[in-house]
Amino acid sequence: MVQRISWPALTEQAIRAWLADDDVWRRGDAYRRAGRVRLPRRSAHGLRAVVYGQAVAPYRVWIRIDAQGIQRAQCTCPVGRDGRCKHVAAVLSLWLHQPGAFLPLPDWAHRLRDWPAERLRAFAVQVLTRCPEAEAWLLAHEGKDERWEETNE
Ligand SMILES: [Zn+2]
């Protein structure tokens, strides 16, 4: 099941106005041209990708978009908490220049529906072992932290 996109076309002007920093836009655009944006995905709620910056591990970016335009964004980089960093700009730049690169985010609830509990548990342990961020999400979920809600889409 592929979710339909119902947001308006984002223009460069709208993206730059949202970022509110032309330097961030230019640096993000350079990241996009350098091929630093990987695994671009889209859903009915927005965009997701990983962006390779200076660190070895890539930063993860989520951008929430609705009919009114960009609502908010998150990035795992040290300056990305308010979502207006060059990594978010790089993802938005890729959406502007190459929207076809964004594959639809699979409907995981549907795809995992028939997995037996044992297999799901084994997979969860693999993810928790390899991805430190997943551990943070799990802990946040246990504590019913709001961040889980924001990233689980
Ligand atoms: Zn960032």
Image (cartoon, helix red, strand yellow):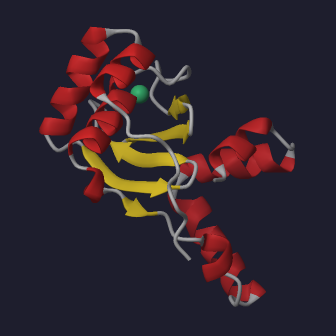
Q: Percent x, y for residue 46?
A: 51, 46
Q: Identify the image quadrant of residue 13.
A: top left
Residue occupying the far left of the picture: 34
In the image, taking residue 74 as reference, residue 90 lies left or right, namely left
Q: How many marks?
A: 0
In the image, taking residue 52 as reference, residue 41 lies left or right, namely right
Residue drawn at the location 28% of the way across and 19% of the way down: 25
Residue drawn at the location 50% of the way across and 44% of the way down: 7
Q: Is residue 93 above or below residue 129?
A: above
Q: Quadrant of ligand 1?
A: top left
Q: Identify the image quadrant of residue 14.
A: top left
Q: Identify the image quadrant of residue 89.
A: top left
Q: Is residue 136 above or below residue 83?
A: below
Closest to the observer, 79 or 139: 79
Residue drawn at the location 35% of the way across and 9% of the way down: 21
Quadrant for the N terminus, please.
bottom right
Residue drawn at the location 68% of the way across and 73% of the way down: 109
Q: Percent x, y for residue 71?
A: 58, 29
Q: Percent x, y for residue 83?
A: 50, 24
